[in-house]
Image: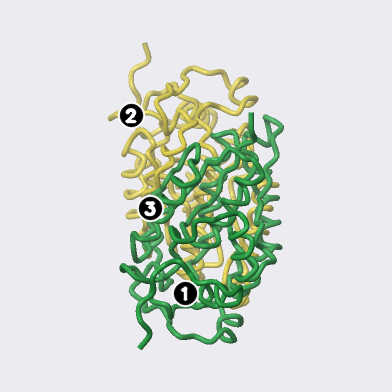
Chain colours: A yellow, B green
Amino acid sequence: MSKKAVVLLSGGLDSTTALAIAHQQGFELHTLSFDYGQRHQREVDAATAVAHHYNVQQQKTVKIDLRAFGGSALTADIPVPHERSMEAMSHDIPITYVPARNTVFLSFALAYAEVSGADDIFLGINAIDYSGYPDCRPEYLQAYEQMANLATKATTQDGRKFHIHAPLMYMNKAEIIRTGIQLAVPYALTWSCYEGGELACGTCDSCLLRLNGFAEVGLQDPIGYKARS
Amino acid sequence: MSKKAVVLLSGGLDSTTALAIAHQQGFELHTLSFDYGQRHQREVDAATAVAHHYNVQQQKTVKIDLRAFGGSALTADIPVPHERSMEAMSHDIPITYVPARNTVFLSFALAYAEVSGADDIFLGINAIDYSGYPDCRPEYLQAYEQMANLATKATTQDGRKFHIHAPLMYMNKAEIIRTGIQLAVPYALTWSCYEGGELACGTCDSCLLRLNGFAEVGLQDPIGYKARS
């Protein structure tokens, strides 16, 4: 019987690549997505399509209301920034930062892992492209894992131990895409844009990082973008 | 201007006492309750009544679906145990344990605290009565606080520091009630029973601990209980 893993799956390029890595490592896959009041359903639909592609054992989408707190361009009525320079992106914590988002996501993943019998949790965060996000750093993740191993019946009574895997932690976007291409990741199914719509905007931080990554590896991004003005 | 605190408020005896302590310490109160697919709305209503009594600055109820994972008598179709001995309660992790519950709750509290400008988070857990719950122990809470201080923009960019307060950690139920009585806690508004209904069952773990506590301090519990058969 294969070992089980819970994979946090947003349907974006990074989390889909993390899923492909867990798949390659032979884990039985249990994916977890969130409908958290982000601006569009497109992301949730992408996660479902990706989970279907990988024929995962179980795909759960949990509805949570991060809008209740506000404080982010992804959950409140604040405009998403466009056309920022790579330089600016690498310095500041952006307005698209969602307060305690990865902490909330990982906590649900921990509950899911405990119940489903998975000792391994995968997520697609990386410390390179989004150095601004505090909850994408290795020291944060180590502290989370330490806490998780004190938090549950699984670890305190049943002798299990949780491992949190962030296989993309030290990769830049081009390295992530190269890895994904080798693993035949269906990037056409993924969605990274912070805006909704039929076509990706091509100018938000997330689109810019993605386009930059594809350009660096010399490949065409298989998803559609709005024509640049 | 008073310092702000986020208080996790279930509407039960413990969290209401924790709220009273934060109130006495002069914090501006921001309470957070969850509608998490527990068996009854009674708990959520009690939290609202208590928040109203304390005239809190802001009361938020967040709907989350812990039923999606199951694994607990409080969120799935598993009978709640009745008439357990204090001995049994103090040993095993009960079936009413909800996987990663406090971790999920604290993660939302952290998001709320970050956005509202509160550096202090209060919760009513204690390690004495429910020694079986792994996420009610001081070592768990310390690990959580350490993680929280690496998780957010508030701490990594804005120089804030989160403190998690569990003022009831080392009190047994009688000590909690004595403290609450001194602070004029409106225990008549609180609800501890794991079952729903007009009257508390008087036989689930939570009722037994509560009744035992009131008996020990020589007071009558002001809420109504079903007649014992």
Q: Are marks 2 and 3 on the same chain?
A: yes
Residue A12 position within the rendered picture, expressed as x and y whole percent measured from the top left: 43, 41
Q: Identify the residue at image location x=46%, y=47%.
A: B53
Element assignment for label 1: helix
Camera-nearest label, 3 or 1 = 1
Circle number at residue B197: none
Q: Of marks 2 and 3, which one's residue comes earlier in the chain?
A: 3
Q: x and y percent of residue A219 in the render?
A: 46, 32
Q: Nearer the viewer, residue B49 or B93?
A: B49
Q: CA distance from mark 2 to mark 1?
A: 59 Å
Residue type pointed to by label 2: Gly
**How many angstroms separate mark 2 from mark 3 (CA)?**
28 Å
Type of the residue with mark 1: Cys
Residue at numbered disc 1: B207
Depicted A222 relative to depicted B39: above or below: above
Asked if badges 3 and 1 are on one and the same chain, I answer: no
Q: Position of residue B52 (x, y in %)?
A: 44, 45
* Nearest to the observer: residue A213 or residue A66: A66
- Return the chain for callout 2: A
Q: Could you tell me which residue is drawn at 42 percent across and 39 percent down?
A: A68
Residue at 55% from the left image edge and 41% from the top image edge: B29
Q: CA distance from mark 3 to mark 1?
A: 31 Å
Q: Which residue is mark 2?
A: A224
Secondary structure, mark 2, is: loop
**Residues at marks 2 and 3 touching, judged by CB atoms closer than 8 Å:** no
Q: Nearer the viewer, mark 2 or mark 3?
A: 3
As helix, strand or loop, the secondary structure at mark 3 comes to strand
The numbered dot on residue A62 is 3
Q: Quadrant of residue B75?
A: bottom left
Disc 1: host chain? B
Name the amino acid type tagged 3.
Val
